[in-house]
Image (spheres, rainbow, N blue to C red):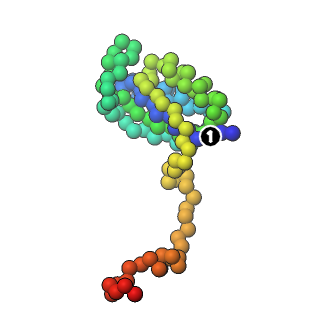
């Protein structure tokens, strides 16, 4: 049974736009080839890292952050993590299972507005200030 996951991806900030797009495309292809489907992808932009990261002989103080939301079979998660660990374009990544996390507003069904319930009416303060 598929479960919901999030992938936080930190890419090398020195990548060209084409290399950045290619790295993200490879992530998408890996997820879909493993039987998953991507619900959303958010670009968080370039941010300062909390600590320096040494990768491929260089030290990085910034990274380009992306957040992928997808569903996937649990036994396929290692299949998407392996290429991320081996990629020189990826500084860091983290896959987490999202249990009980609200989906983005665009994916939530619209709640119907309802009038006040009886319990709402009984809990309203008395405008006169008297105890009752």
Quadrant position of residue 12: top left
Judge whether 22 appears above or below 120 on screen: above
Q: Position of residue 71 (x, y in %)?
A: 60, 39
Tell me the residue that label 1 is attached to: 3
48 sits to left or right of 42: left
Nearer to the camera, 130 or 128: 130
Residue at 44% across / 21% down in the picture? 89
Residue at 33% across / 34% down in the picture? 47
Residue lying furthest front: 131
Residue lying furthest top: 57
Judge whether 128 appears above or below 84 on screen: below
Quadrant position of residue 114: bottom right
| SS type, badge 1 | strand
132 sits to left or right of 82: left
Nearer to the camera, 53 or 39: 53
Quadrant, the N terminus:
top right
Asked whether residue 92 appears in the rendered view, the answer is yes
Asked whether residue 21 appears in the rendered view, the answer is no
Quadrant position of residue 64: top left
Q: Residues within 10 Å of mark 1 (few under 14, many from 20)?
A: few
Q: Position of residue 128 (x, y in %)?
A: 33, 87
Residue at 32% across / 84% down in the picture? 129
Residue at 38% across / 79% down in the picture? 125
22 sits to left or right of 126: right
Q: Position of residue 52 (x, y in %)?
A: 32, 23
């Amino acid at each position: 049974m598929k479960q919901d996951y999030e992938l936080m991806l930190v890419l090398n900030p020195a990548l060209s736009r084409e290399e950045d797009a290619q790295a993200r495309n490879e992530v998408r292809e890996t997820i879909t080839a493993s039987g998953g489907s991507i619900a959303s992808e958010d670009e968080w932009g370039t941010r300062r890292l909390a600590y320096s990261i040494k990768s491929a002989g260089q030290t990085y103080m910034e990274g380009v952050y992306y957040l992928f939301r997808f569903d996937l079979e649990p036994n396929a998660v290692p299949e998407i993590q392996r290429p991320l660990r081996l990629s020189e374009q990826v500084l860091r990544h983290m896959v987490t299972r999202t249990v009980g996390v609200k989906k983005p507003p665009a994916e939530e069904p619209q709640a119907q507005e309802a009038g006040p319930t009886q319990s709402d009416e009984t809990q309203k303060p008395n405008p006169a200030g008297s105890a009752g």
